[in-house]
Protein backbone atom coordinates (compact mmCIF):
# COMPACT_ATOMS: atom_id res chain seq x y z
CA UNK A 1 0.00 0.00 0.00
CA UNK A 2 1.35 3.43 -0.84
CA UNK A 3 2.30 5.32 2.28
CA UNK A 4 0.33 8.45 1.45
CA UNK A 5 -2.93 6.68 0.76
CA UNK A 6 -2.40 4.39 3.76
CA UNK A 7 -2.14 7.37 6.05
CA UNK A 8 -5.35 9.03 4.89
CA UNK A 9 -7.67 6.13 4.06
CA UNK A 10 -10.37 5.41 6.62
CA UNK A 11 -9.95 1.75 7.48
CA UNK A 12 -13.29 -0.10 7.46
CA UNK A 13 -14.07 -2.14 10.52
CA UNK A 14 -13.63 -5.84 9.74
CA UNK A 15 -16.59 -8.21 9.96
CA UNK A 16 -15.68 -11.42 11.73
CA UNK A 17 -16.98 -14.64 10.21
CA UNK A 18 -19.31 -16.93 12.14
CA UNK A 19 -18.00 -19.59 14.45
CA UNK A 20 -17.77 -20.47 18.16
CA UNK A 21 -14.39 -18.83 18.77
CA UNK A 22 -13.16 -16.53 21.54
CA UNK A 23 -10.54 -14.24 20.06
CA UNK A 24 -7.50 -13.66 22.27
CA UNK A 25 -5.01 -10.82 22.62
CA UNK A 26 -1.38 -11.75 23.38
CA UNK A 27 -0.63 -11.67 27.10
CA UNK A 28 1.66 -8.86 28.27
CA UNK A 29 5.12 -9.93 29.38
CA UNK A 30 5.96 -7.43 32.13
CA UNK A 31 5.94 -8.11 35.85
CA UNK A 32 3.19 -5.63 36.73
CA UNK A 33 -0.52 -6.37 36.78
CA UNK A 34 -2.59 -3.92 34.75
CA UNK A 35 -5.57 -1.71 35.42
CA UNK A 36 -7.57 0.35 32.95
CA UNK A 37 -10.23 3.04 32.97
CA UNK A 38 -12.11 4.77 30.14
CA UNK A 39 -12.95 8.42 30.68
CA UNK A 40 -15.19 11.01 29.06
CA UNK A 41 -13.42 14.36 28.67
CA UNK A 42 -15.00 17.65 27.57
CA UNK A 43 -12.98 20.53 26.12
CA UNK A 44 -15.21 23.57 26.53
CA UNK A 45 -12.74 25.91 24.85
CA UNK A 46 -13.59 24.84 21.28
CA UNK A 47 -16.43 23.41 19.20
CA UNK A 48 -16.15 20.06 17.53
CA UNK A 49 -14.10 20.54 14.33
CA UNK A 50 -16.16 18.02 12.36
CA UNK A 51 -19.63 18.93 13.67
CA UNK A 52 -19.57 22.69 14.48
CA UNK A 53 -23.10 22.52 15.91
CA UNK A 54 -21.56 20.62 18.82
CA UNK A 55 -20.33 23.58 20.88
CA UNK A 56 -17.79 21.59 22.90
CA UNK A 57 -15.26 18.96 21.90
CA UNK A 58 -15.93 15.61 23.60
CA UNK A 59 -13.39 12.82 23.75
CA UNK A 60 -13.05 9.34 25.15
CA UNK A 61 -9.65 8.34 26.44
CA UNK A 62 -8.46 5.18 28.14
CA UNK A 63 -5.65 4.82 30.66
CA UNK A 64 -3.64 1.60 31.05
CA UNK A 65 -1.39 1.46 34.10
CA UNK A 66 0.52 -0.73 36.56
CA UNK A 67 -1.96 -1.85 39.20
CA UNK A 68 -2.31 -3.66 42.47
CA UNK A 69 -3.68 -7.17 42.36
CA UNK A 70 -7.41 -6.77 41.76
CA UNK A 71 -8.62 -10.17 40.63
CA UNK A 72 -12.00 -9.46 42.20
CA UNK A 73 -12.58 -6.82 39.51
CA UNK A 74 -13.70 -7.79 35.99
CA UNK A 75 -11.38 -7.85 33.02
CA UNK A 76 -12.04 -4.96 30.67
CA UNK A 77 -13.56 -5.75 27.27
CA UNK A 78 -11.45 -4.97 24.23
CA UNK A 79 -13.95 -2.44 22.85
CA UNK A 80 -17.12 -0.69 24.03
CA UNK A 81 -20.50 -2.43 23.57
CA UNK A 82 -21.50 -0.27 20.59
CA UNK A 83 -18.19 -0.83 18.85
CA UNK A 84 -18.42 -4.55 19.59
CA UNK A 85 -21.80 -4.63 17.83
CA UNK A 86 -20.25 -2.89 14.83
CA UNK A 87 -17.31 -5.29 14.62
CA UNK A 88 -19.20 -8.44 15.49
CA UNK A 89 -22.97 -8.32 14.95
CA UNK A 90 -25.18 -10.51 17.15
CA UNK A 91 -25.41 -14.10 16.00
CA UNK A 92 -21.94 -14.31 14.49
CA UNK A 93 -20.82 -16.91 17.03
CA UNK A 94 -17.60 -15.04 17.74
CA UNK A 95 -16.71 -13.50 21.05
CA UNK A 96 -14.42 -10.50 20.93
CA UNK A 97 -11.44 -10.60 23.27
CA UNK A 98 -11.17 -9.51 26.83
CA UNK A 99 -8.10 -7.53 27.78
CA UNK A 100 -5.68 -8.47 30.56
CA UNK A 101 -6.51 -5.32 32.54
CA UNK A 102 -8.85 -5.05 35.52
CA UNK A 103 -11.46 -2.30 35.34
CA UNK A 104 -10.70 0.48 37.78
CA UNK A 105 -8.00 -1.37 39.68
CA UNK A 106 -6.05 0.72 42.23
CA UNK A 107 -2.83 2.06 40.72
CA UNK A 108 0.54 0.82 41.85
CA UNK A 109 2.69 3.72 43.11
CA UNK A 110 5.46 4.59 40.69
CA UNK A 111 9.14 5.14 41.46
CA UNK A 112 10.16 8.64 42.57
CA UNK A 113 8.13 11.03 40.35
CA UNK A 114 5.80 8.30 39.10
CA UNK A 115 5.39 6.14 36.01
CA UNK A 116 6.37 7.70 32.66
CA UNK A 117 3.45 8.41 30.32
CA UNK A 118 2.99 7.25 26.72
CA UNK A 119 0.22 8.82 24.63
CA UNK A 120 -1.24 6.81 21.75
CA UNK A 121 -3.07 8.18 18.69
CA UNK A 122 -4.61 5.66 16.24
CA UNK A 123 -4.82 5.87 12.47
CA UNK A 124 -7.39 7.96 10.62
CA UNK A 125 -10.72 6.18 10.88
CA UNK A 126 -9.42 3.79 13.53
CA UNK A 127 -10.43 3.46 17.19
CA UNK A 128 -8.34 4.02 20.33
CA UNK A 129 -8.37 0.31 21.19
CA UNK A 130 -6.67 -0.74 17.94
CA UNK A 131 -3.27 -1.26 19.61
CA UNK A 132 -4.33 -2.62 22.98
CA UNK A 133 -1.64 -5.32 22.82
CA UNK A 134 1.04 -2.62 22.79
CA UNK A 135 -0.68 -0.51 25.48
CA UNK A 136 -0.91 -3.50 27.80
CA UNK A 137 2.71 -4.45 27.20
CA UNK A 138 4.00 -0.99 28.08
CA UNK A 139 1.76 -0.78 31.16
CA UNK A 140 3.01 -4.16 32.39
CA UNK A 141 6.58 -2.82 32.21
CA UNK A 142 5.94 0.35 34.19
CA UNK A 143 4.32 2.95 31.93
CA UNK A 144 0.98 4.72 31.99
CA UNK A 145 -0.49 4.60 28.49
CA UNK A 146 -3.22 7.02 27.42
CA UNK A 147 -5.07 6.01 24.24
CA UNK A 148 -7.18 8.70 22.56
CA UNK A 149 -10.34 8.38 20.47
CA UNK A 150 -10.53 11.30 18.03
CA UNK A 151 -14.30 11.83 17.89
CA UNK A 152 -15.98 11.93 14.44
CA UNK A 153 -12.65 10.82 12.90
CA UNK A 154 -12.97 7.40 14.57
CA UNK A 155 -15.74 5.28 13.02
CA UNK A 156 -17.61 5.17 16.33
CA UNK A 157 -17.05 6.59 19.80
CA UNK A 158 -19.33 5.48 22.64
CA UNK A 159 -19.83 7.87 25.55
CA UNK A 160 -21.19 6.99 29.01
CA UNK A 161 -24.84 6.00 28.90
CA UNK A 162 -24.52 4.47 25.43
CA UNK A 163 -24.56 7.72 23.44
CA UNK A 164 -22.68 7.21 20.18
CA UNK A 165 -20.77 9.65 17.95
CA UNK A 166 -20.14 8.31 14.46
CA UNK A 167 -17.65 9.40 11.84
CA UNK A 168 -18.44 12.81 10.35
CA UNK A 169 -15.61 12.86 7.81
CA UNK A 170 -17.16 14.19 4.58
CA UNK A 171 -17.27 11.86 1.57
CA UNK A 172 -14.72 12.63 -1.15
CA UNK A 173 -15.81 14.83 -4.04
CA UNK A 174 -12.68 14.62 -6.16
CA UNK A 175 -11.88 18.34 -5.90
CA UNK A 176 -8.19 19.26 -6.34
CA UNK A 177 -6.36 19.43 -3.03
CA UNK A 178 -9.27 17.89 -1.15
CA UNK A 179 -7.22 15.10 0.40
CA UNK A 180 -4.53 17.50 1.65
CA UNK A 181 -7.13 19.81 3.21
CA UNK A 182 -8.85 16.89 4.90
CA UNK A 183 -5.62 15.62 6.40
CA UNK A 184 -4.65 19.12 7.56
CA UNK A 185 -8.03 19.48 9.29
CA UNK A 186 -7.79 16.06 10.92
CA UNK A 187 -4.22 16.68 12.04
CA UNK A 188 -5.07 20.04 13.63
CA UNK A 189 -8.00 18.46 15.48
CA UNK A 190 -5.86 15.57 16.71
CA UNK A 191 -3.06 17.82 17.95
CA UNK A 192 -5.60 19.97 19.81
CA UNK A 193 -7.15 16.79 21.28
CA UNK A 194 -3.75 15.57 22.45
CA UNK A 195 -2.73 18.87 24.02
CA UNK A 196 -6.07 19.03 25.83
CA UNK A 197 -5.41 15.54 27.21
CA UNK A 198 -1.99 16.71 28.40
CA UNK A 199 -3.59 19.69 30.14
CA UNK A 200 -6.18 17.39 31.70
CA UNK A 201 -3.50 15.02 32.99
CA UNK A 202 -1.73 17.92 34.70
CA UNK A 203 -4.75 18.77 36.86
CA UNK A 204 -5.71 16.72 39.94
CA UNK A 205 -8.39 14.20 38.96
CA UNK A 206 -10.78 12.79 41.52
CA UNK A 207 -12.55 10.51 39.07
CA UNK A 208 -9.50 8.31 38.49
CA UNK A 209 -9.01 4.96 40.22
CA UNK A 210 -7.30 5.08 43.59
CA UNK A 211 -3.74 6.37 43.41
CA UNK A 212 -3.65 6.80 39.64
CA UNK A 213 -3.23 10.55 39.30
CA UNK A 214 -0.43 10.52 41.88
CA UNK A 215 1.31 7.74 39.91
CA UNK A 216 1.65 9.91 36.77
CA UNK A 217 5.11 11.33 36.04
CA UNK A 218 4.13 14.69 34.56
CA UNK A 219 7.69 15.43 33.45
CA UNK A 220 8.28 12.31 31.36
CA UNK A 221 5.89 11.94 28.44
CA UNK A 222 6.31 10.29 25.04
CA UNK A 223 3.93 9.60 22.17
CA UNK A 224 3.31 6.76 19.73
CA UNK A 225 0.97 6.97 16.75
CA UNK A 226 -0.08 4.71 13.90
CA UNK A 227 -0.57 6.13 10.41
CA UNK A 228 -2.05 9.64 10.82
CA UNK A 229 -1.52 9.10 14.54
CA UNK A 230 2.23 8.98 13.85
CA UNK A 231 2.05 12.35 12.14
CA UNK A 232 0.03 13.56 15.13
CA UNK A 233 2.83 12.46 17.45
CA UNK A 234 5.41 14.50 15.51
CA UNK A 235 3.23 17.60 15.15
CA UNK A 236 2.29 17.47 18.84
CA UNK A 237 5.98 17.32 19.74
CA UNK A 238 6.55 20.43 17.63
CA UNK A 239 3.77 22.35 19.33
CA UNK A 240 4.16 21.03 22.87
CA UNK A 241 7.53 20.44 24.49
CA UNK A 242 5.95 18.32 27.20
CA UNK A 243 6.28 15.40 24.76
CA UNK A 244 9.91 14.27 24.98
CA UNK A 245 10.10 11.51 22.34
CA UNK A 246 7.92 10.09 19.57
CA UNK A 247 7.27 7.17 17.24
CA UNK A 248 5.49 7.10 13.88
CA UNK A 249 4.22 3.65 12.94
CA UNK A 250 3.91 3.64 9.14
CA UNK A 251 2.25 7.02 8.61
CA UNK A 252 2.98 9.54 5.88
CA UNK A 253 4.19 12.86 7.30
CA UNK A 254 2.61 16.30 7.00
CA UNK A 255 2.22 19.56 8.92
CA UNK A 256 4.58 22.31 10.06
CA UNK A 257 6.96 19.71 11.45
CA UNK A 258 7.95 18.94 7.85
CA UNK A 259 9.82 22.24 7.64
CA UNK A 260 10.52 23.09 11.28
CA UNK A 261 11.71 19.67 12.38
CA UNK A 262 12.28 18.37 15.90
CA UNK A 263 15.16 18.54 18.35
CA UNK A 264 14.07 15.51 20.41
CA UNK A 265 14.23 11.75 19.75
CA UNK A 266 11.97 10.38 17.02
CA UNK A 267 11.65 6.91 15.49
CA UNK A 268 10.08 5.98 12.15
CA UNK A 269 8.86 2.38 11.85
CA UNK A 270 7.69 1.36 8.39
CA UNK A 271 5.88 -1.63 7.02
CA UNK A 272 7.74 -3.77 4.49
CA UNK A 273 8.83 -1.55 1.60
CA UNK A 274 7.83 1.72 3.30
CA UNK A 275 10.80 3.96 4.00
CA UNK A 276 12.54 7.16 3.05
CA UNK A 277 13.57 5.73 -0.31
CA UNK A 278 9.96 5.55 -1.48
CA UNK A 279 8.15 8.09 0.68
CA UNK A 280 9.17 11.67 0.01
CA UNK A 281 7.41 12.84 3.17
CA UNK A 282 9.64 10.61 5.28
CA UNK A 283 12.75 11.78 3.43
CA UNK A 284 11.85 15.45 3.95
CA UNK A 285 11.00 14.91 7.62
CA UNK A 286 14.21 12.95 8.24
CA UNK A 287 16.26 15.83 6.85
CA UNK A 288 14.95 18.30 9.45
CA UNK A 289 15.31 16.05 12.50
CA UNK A 290 17.95 17.54 14.80
CA UNK A 291 17.66 15.12 17.71
CA UNK A 292 18.34 11.37 17.91
CA UNK A 293 16.60 9.63 15.00
CA UNK A 294 16.10 6.08 13.85
CA UNK A 295 14.36 4.40 10.93
CA UNK A 296 13.21 0.79 11.20
CA UNK A 297 11.29 -1.46 8.82
CA UNK A 298 9.31 -4.57 9.78
CA UNK A 299 9.81 -7.33 7.21
CA UNK A 300 6.77 -8.88 5.52
CA UNK A 301 4.35 -6.56 7.33
CA UNK A 302 1.48 -4.42 6.02
CA UNK A 303 0.02 -1.10 7.07
CA UNK A 304 -2.47 -2.64 9.52
CA UNK A 305 0.17 -4.91 11.04
CA UNK A 306 0.59 -2.14 13.63
CA UNK A 307 -2.80 -2.92 15.16
CA UNK A 308 -4.43 -5.76 17.08
CA UNK A 309 -6.07 -6.93 13.86
CA UNK A 310 -2.70 -8.51 13.03
CA UNK A 311 -3.48 -11.27 15.54
CA UNK A 312 -7.28 -11.21 15.73
CA UNK A 313 -8.26 -11.55 12.08
CA UNK A 314 -6.25 -14.75 11.50
CA UNK A 315 -7.84 -16.22 14.64
CA UNK A 316 -11.21 -15.50 13.06
CA UNK A 317 -10.33 -17.81 10.18
CA UNK A 318 -9.97 -15.10 7.52
CA UNK A 319 -7.83 -16.64 4.73
CA UNK A 320 -4.26 -15.37 4.68
CA UNK A 321 -4.54 -14.35 1.05
CA UNK A 322 -7.43 -12.03 1.94
CA UNK A 323 -5.37 -10.36 4.65
CA UNK A 324 -2.02 -9.99 2.91
CA UNK A 325 -2.83 -6.57 1.40
CA UNK A 326 -3.37 -5.00 4.83
CA UNK A 327 -1.41 -7.27 7.15
CA UNK A 328 1.39 -8.60 4.96
CA UNK A 329 2.54 -12.19 5.38
CA UNK A 330 4.32 -11.96 8.75
CA UNK A 331 2.91 -14.21 11.47
CA UNK A 332 0.64 -12.06 13.63
CA UNK A 333 1.89 -13.27 17.01
CA UNK A 334 5.48 -12.80 15.91
CA UNK A 335 4.71 -9.33 14.55
CA UNK A 336 3.30 -8.22 17.89
CA UNK A 337 6.25 -9.70 19.77
CA UNK A 338 8.77 -7.79 17.63
CA UNK A 339 6.86 -4.51 17.81
CA UNK A 340 6.46 -4.77 21.56
CA UNK A 341 10.20 -5.33 22.00
CA UNK A 342 11.20 -2.26 19.99
CA UNK A 343 8.54 0.08 21.37
CA UNK A 344 9.48 -0.94 24.90
CA UNK A 345 13.14 -0.33 24.04
CA UNK A 346 12.20 3.14 22.74
CA UNK A 347 10.35 3.95 25.97
CA UNK A 348 13.12 2.54 28.15
CA UNK A 349 15.79 4.50 26.27
CA UNK A 350 14.18 7.92 26.06
CA UNK A 351 11.58 7.98 28.82
CA UNK A 352 12.70 5.84 31.76
CA UNK A 353 16.44 5.92 31.12
CA UNK A 354 16.79 2.19 31.68
CA UNK A 355 19.25 1.82 28.83
CA UNK A 356 19.53 -1.38 26.77
CA UNK A 357 21.09 -2.14 23.41
CA UNK A 358 18.18 -3.18 21.19
CA UNK A 359 18.08 0.17 19.38
CA UNK A 360 21.82 0.13 18.70
CA UNK A 361 21.58 -2.05 15.59
CA UNK A 362 20.29 -5.31 14.10
CA UNK A 363 19.57 -8.06 16.61
CA UNK A 364 19.77 -11.78 15.88
CA UNK A 365 16.76 -12.37 18.14
CA UNK A 366 14.59 -10.12 15.95
CA UNK A 367 15.75 -10.54 12.33
CA UNK A 368 12.38 -9.21 11.12
CA UNK A 369 13.36 -5.66 12.09
CA UNK A 370 15.60 -3.89 9.61
CA UNK A 371 17.70 -0.85 10.54
CA UNK A 372 17.80 1.56 7.61
CA UNK A 373 20.80 3.88 7.22
Image: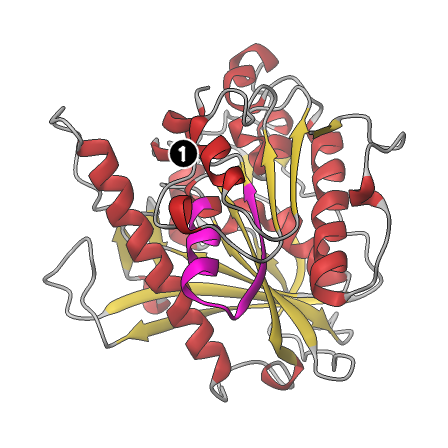
- Where is residue 56? Give x, y as percent: 21, 71
- Residue span colored magenta: 231-248
Q: In the visual, does 135 lie left or right of 129? A: right
Residue 98 visible, this angle: no
Name above or below for residue 331 compared with residue 320: below
- Where is residue 205? Give x, y as percent: 49, 86
The crowd level at tag 1 (other Cα within 10 Å; few <14, some 14-19, many 20+) is many
Considering depth in this image, is 229 or 280 the residue closer to the camera?
A: 280
Determine the secondary structure under disc 1: helix
Name above or below for residue 172 compared with residue 165: above
Q: In the visual, does 121 lie left or right of 132? A: left
Name above or below for residue 268 compared with residue 200: above
Q: Residue at x 23, y 32 (%)?
A: 179
- Where is residue 184? Give x, y as percent: 27, 45
Q: Residue at x 67, y 70 (%)?
A: 116
Indicate whether residue 55 is drawn in magenta.
no
Q: In the visual, does 325 lie left or right of 373? A: left
Q: Which residue is mark 1?
A: 7
Work out which quarter of the rendered image holds the C terminus and state it.
Answer: top right
Q: Residue at x 49, y 82 (%)?
A: 202
Q: Residue at x 86, y 33 (%)?
A: 363
Colour mode of the rendering: secondary structure
Considering depth in this image, is 166 or 234 the residue closer to the camera?
A: 234
Amino acid sequence: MAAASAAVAAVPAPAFAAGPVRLVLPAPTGRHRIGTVALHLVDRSRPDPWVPAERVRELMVQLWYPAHDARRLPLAPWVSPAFAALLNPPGSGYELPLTHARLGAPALPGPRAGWPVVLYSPGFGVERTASTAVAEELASHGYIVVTIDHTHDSPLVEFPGGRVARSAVPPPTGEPGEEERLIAKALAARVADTRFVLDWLARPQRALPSGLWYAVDQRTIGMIGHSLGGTTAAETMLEDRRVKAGVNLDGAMSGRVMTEGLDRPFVLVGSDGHGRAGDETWAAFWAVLRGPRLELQLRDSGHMSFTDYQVLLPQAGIPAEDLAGQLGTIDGERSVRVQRAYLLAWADCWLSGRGGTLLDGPCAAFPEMRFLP
